[in-house]
Image (cartoon, helix red, strand yellow):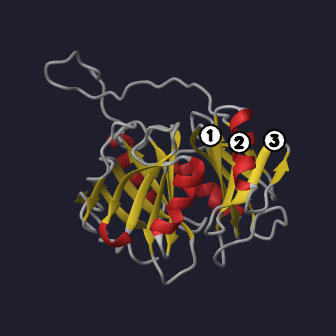
Amino acid sequence: MNITGAENLIFGVEDIDACRRFCSLYGLKESQASEKLASFRALDGSGVELRPMDDPELPAAQVPGSTLRAAVWGVSARADLDAIAKELGKDRQIRWVDDVLQTTDDDNNGLFFRVTQRVPYDSALPLVNVPGRAAMRFNKRVDFDNHGPARQLGHVVYWSPDPARSVAFYKDRLGFRITDSYAGDMGIFARAAGHHDHHSLFFIKNPQIPPSFQHAEFTFGDIQDVIAGGHKLTRAGYQTLFGPGRFELGSNWYWYFVTPMGGAFELGADIDLVDDNWKPGVFEFPRGAAGWAMGINWDMTRG
């Protein structure tokens, strides 16, 4: 089951036009737009799909209002899809829609799989000048008004009353690897076997609300993109949820914003890349959550 990472997020929303505005400013490129469907893509083809919240084709919502209705995960080949279908068909309903396998995880979050549709793209290096190395930016000012586009969907995060139980499904049934966790079952990071970001998936403990979408992260080129993108969203009137800053766990730069899709979107950059030689750690919560943190001091145990 060579799962290569999350690569599409399907939302049911109250106001598609408001969500379209956010996604465009955030750094995703619109690829389709109508009253019933809008799609946005990062450079590698991963992205976001927006549908009316009453669309009968959507999986059931976990919470009222706009929210994520399904995360679509890529796999390397059709044989991986067949293996997942065989495994998950043992104890839950599965169905095929075209070549997409649709089911749910143990928390009833919508969970889809397809052969990966990520595409190569021009991964230009950030223009960063480092002493002792040839200049990357010469006679050129930094652009303070714009930021580079989102390059890829990095990870998806859910609230859970019991992160250990929630992640066990992904670990035991789908081959995910635990990369780090918080003591007391406060949160667990995991990555798909074919994805090398520090985490593809994160469960945060919150027994006060149903299991549901908490945030998603798209990865940008560098810290300049994160800060410039955050300033653009701030000027447009969007509320900071957390940040900007840099995490200890994962090492990624971040800036989170409240979205009209429900939950938050994170602008991220420079996350740790790991493989099976990585040594997972257990950390006291919330150490590692904030790292270098500015802005709002968000309580990660609350919605």
The kind of secondary structure element at disc 1 is: loop
x, y percentage for residue 221? 41, 36
The kind of secondary structure element at disc 3 is: loop
Marks 3/1: CA–CA distance: 16 Å
Q: Is residue 255 visible?
A: yes
Q: Residue furthest left?
A: 132
Give the residue at x 75% y 48%.
86
Residue labelled with disc 1: 1
Q: Is residue 122 left or right of residue 118?
A: left
* Badge 2 amino acid: Ala
User: Which sits earlier in the primary sequence, circle 1 or circle 2?
Assistant: 1
Q: Is residue 232 visible?
A: no
Q: Are marks 3 and 1 in contact (CB under 8 Å)?
A: no
* Badge 1 amino acid: Met
Residue labelled with disc 2: 83
* Badge 3 amino acid: Asp
Q: Are marks 1 and 2 in contact (CB under 8 Å)?
A: yes
Marks 1/2: CA–CA distance: 6 Å
What is the quadrant of residue 256 in the picture? Answer: bottom left
Residue labelled with disc 3: 99
The kind of secondary structure element at disc 2 is: helix
Give the residue at x 26% y 53%.
248
x, y percentage for residue 67? 63, 68
x, y percentage for residue 121? 55, 25
The crowd level at tag 1 (other Cα within 10 Å; few <14, some 14-19, many 20+) is: many
Q: Nearer the viewer, residue 220 or 213?
A: 213
Q: Is residue 156 above or below residue 100?
A: below
Q: Is residue 14 left or right of residue 23?
A: right
User: Which sits earlier in the primary sequence, circle 3 or circle 2?
Assistant: 2
Q: Nearer the viewer, residue 178 or 100?
A: 178
Q: Nearer the viewer, residue 124 or 204?
A: 204
- Can you say which quadrant of the picture contains the N terminus? top right
